[in-house]
Image: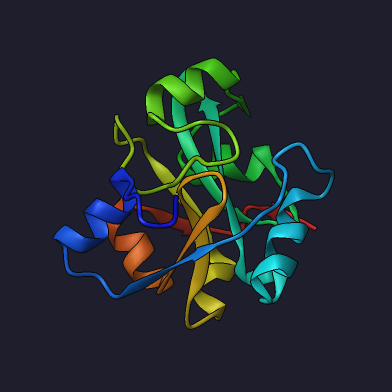
Amino acid sequence: MAGQGTPATALLAKRKITHSTHPYDVSPEAPNYGALVAAALGVPPERVFKSLVTEVDGGLTVAVVPVTGELDLKALAAAVGGKRATMADRTVAERATGYVRGGISPLGQRKRLPTVVDASALDHPTVYVSAGRRGLQLQLSPTDLIALTAAVTAPLAAR
């Protein structure tokens, strides 16, 4: 399992982006999943980010927020110039990204979606995001994450 690549890791390798992969063993059905992933990795939870697929005014958008907070949907809509944001249907999210829930990476998605990264990512030298498979995280600089996803940054997390 740890040796298998994903579209996200392939993108990083192709672009020669400094990163590392970190396997972990946490059930995706566990309550407080993100905090458990951070604990399994031995890193502060504010450095671990989840990728949430949303719909803003009918179009899909990815929000990348720390696992320590919830997504502020109004802030997300404002960040992309929209009026209303909702969480996308799980099937729609999986089909658009090519990843399964609990393993959706902001990188290497089947269809490149507009992305907004919570501004707190820039407070850390590196952040952790899903590598595109449950049980595997990527560690990379937030500036590389933002550049590769063509993301905008904005305060998105409601704490």
Q: Is residue 146 left or right of residue 158?
A: left
* Point 48% across, 39% down: residue: 62
* Position in image of residue 86 (x %, y %): 64, 26
Quadrant in the rendering for residue 15: bottom left
Closest to the observer: 35 or 147?
Answer: 35
Q: Quadrant of the C terminus?
A: bottom right
* Position in image of residue 34 (x %, y %): 71, 54
* Point 51% across, 70% down: residue: 127
Outermost residue toward the right? 31
**Relative to 141, is 6 above or below?**
above
Count of all numbered marks drawn on residues in the image: 0
**Relative to 13, is 92 above or below?**
above
* Point 55% across, 30% down: residue: 54
Quadrant in the rendering for residue 31: top right
Closest to the observer: 157 or 99?
Answer: 99
* Point 36% across, 61% down: residue: 146
> Taking the image as drawn, is residue 145 in sight?
yes
> Taking the image as drawn, is residue 68 in sight?
no
* Position in image of residue 97 (x %, y %): 39, 31
Q: Is residue 73 left or right of residue 52?
A: right
Q: Is residue 4 left or right of residue 127?
A: left
* Position in image of residue 32 (x %, y %): 82, 50
Closest to the observer: 68 or 29?
Answer: 29
User: How is colour applied across the structure in the image?
Assistant: rainbow
Quadrant in the rendering for residue 45: bottom right
**Relative to 108, is 36 above or below?**
below
Q: Is residue 89 left or right of residue 60?
A: right
Outermost residue toward the bottom? 125
